[in-house]
Image (cartoon, rainbow, N blue to C red):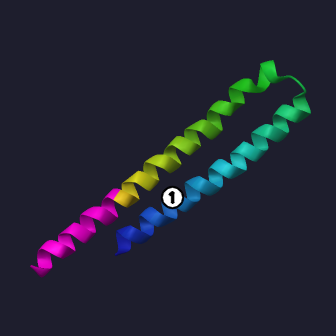
Amino acid sequence: MNMNKYYRFSEIMWLLLTITVTIMVVVLMISEESIEKSKWYLIIPLLSAAMYIMRRSLRIRFEKNQSEGNAKGKK
């Protein structure tokens, strides 16, 4: 059960980081008034979104394996 909390915490942390970084990048792009120079900053939110998706899939897979293990243990 402890790993389930860890996976959930990691998932929420990456989601909040993705939202925060996206807002910061948009504000930076607006303040620089040059999309050509600041378009490379969009890589950072994309990487954090990829980490969120990876963490979410790991948590779902962990919960699925855990529920299958519990079902086999009851038989």
In this view, the residue farthest toward the left is 75
35 above or below 29?
A: above
Residue 6, position as x, y percentages in the image: 43, 66
Which residue is painted at 86% across and 22% down in the image?
A: 34
The magenta segment: 61-75
Q: What secondary structure characterizes most of the magenta part?
A: helix
Residue hosting label 1: 11
In this view, the residue farthest toward the bottom is 74
In this view, the residue farthest toward the top is 36
Callout 1: SS? helix
Residue 8, position as x, y percentages in the image: 47, 65
Task: Depth check: give the residue in front, 60 or 30.
Answer: 60
75 sits to left or right of 9? left
12 sits to left or right of 4? right
Q: Is residue 1 magenta?
A: no
Residue 42, position as x, y percentages in the image: 68, 32
- Looking at the picture, which amino acid does disc 1 mark? Glu
Residue 1, position as x, y percentages in the image: 34, 75
The image quarter in which residue 60 lies = bottom left
